[in-house]
Image (cartoon, rainbow, N blue to C red):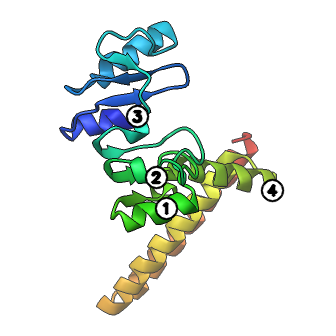
Amino acid sequence: MYAGHFFKQAGCKVIGIKEADVALLNEEGIDVGELASYKRLNNTIKGFKGAKETKEDLLLHPCDILIPAAVEKSINSENAAKIQAKIIAEGANGPTTPAADAVLQSRKILVIPDLYCNAGGVTASYFEYLKNINHISFGKLSFRQESQNLREVLRSVEESLKEAGVLRQAQANRRTQTLSGQRQRSGCRGLGA
């Protein structure tokens, strides 16, 4: 449902949404904002008046963009030939099997892989993994990343200044800033930050 908000902002129409307990369809478009409010109040989309409940397999319903966003291997060799979407944007992890992918490619249906469409979950998992194997908190991980980014920015600026012939003044300023930053950081550590 979350992607629906962005589609609505872009002027698109969301015609179908499926959750574990019900599938909703409205060819005129589902108001995803109203649906989200309804779900917050009722803990389900079942009974939402802005669309009809359907037993139809929404994966097979004609549409421009299909977003399988819940179940792994939901598009497989048994249903790939029946899919009527022009584009599939994989919101779930691995929603398309390799056999289905071959069928979709032969039918010239564009499949945007989960690696691109579902990068937020993968990124969060990666940071969780790093945190666990290194036994560090997100605060320290963030500090390390920020420090690395700042060093890269400084290196880039230095390079530009060297090309412009003003490196000596930049180096003097950098030394002053670095010493000042080290003093501030040491003071913060003493306070438990």
The relative height of residue 95 versus residue 19 in the rendered view (above or below) is below
| Residue occupying image coordinates x 39% and y 77% | 157
- The tag earlier along the polypeptide, 2 or 4, is 2
Secondary structure found at label 3 = helix
Left or right, residue 50 beside residue 3: left
| Label 2 close to label 4 by CB (< 8 Å) | no
Crowd band around label 3 with a 10 angstrom C-alpha radius: few (<14), some (14–19), many (20+):
some
Q: CA distance from mark 1 to mark 3?
A: 18 Å
- The tag earlier along the polypeptide, 4 or 3, is 3
Tell me the number on the disc at residue 80.
2
| Residue occupying image coordinates x 28% and y 39% | 7
- The tag earlier along the polypeptide, 1 or 3, is 3
| Residue occupying image coordinates x 38% and y 22% | 24
Q: CA distance from mark 2 to mark 4?
A: 39 Å
Q: CA distance from mark 4 to mark 3?
A: 41 Å
Indicate the amino acid at tag 3. Leu
Residue corresponding to mark 1: 101
Secondary structure found at label 2 = helix
| Label 1 close to label 3 by CB (< 8 Å) | no
Crowd band around label 2 with a 10 angstrom C-alpha radius: few (<14), some (14–19), many (20+):
many
| Label 2 close to label 1 by CB (< 8 Å) | yes
Indicate the amino acid at tag 4. Ile
| Viewer-side residue, 76 vs 12 | 76
Q: CA distance from mark 3 to mark 2?
A: 13 Å
Residue corresponding to mark 3: 58
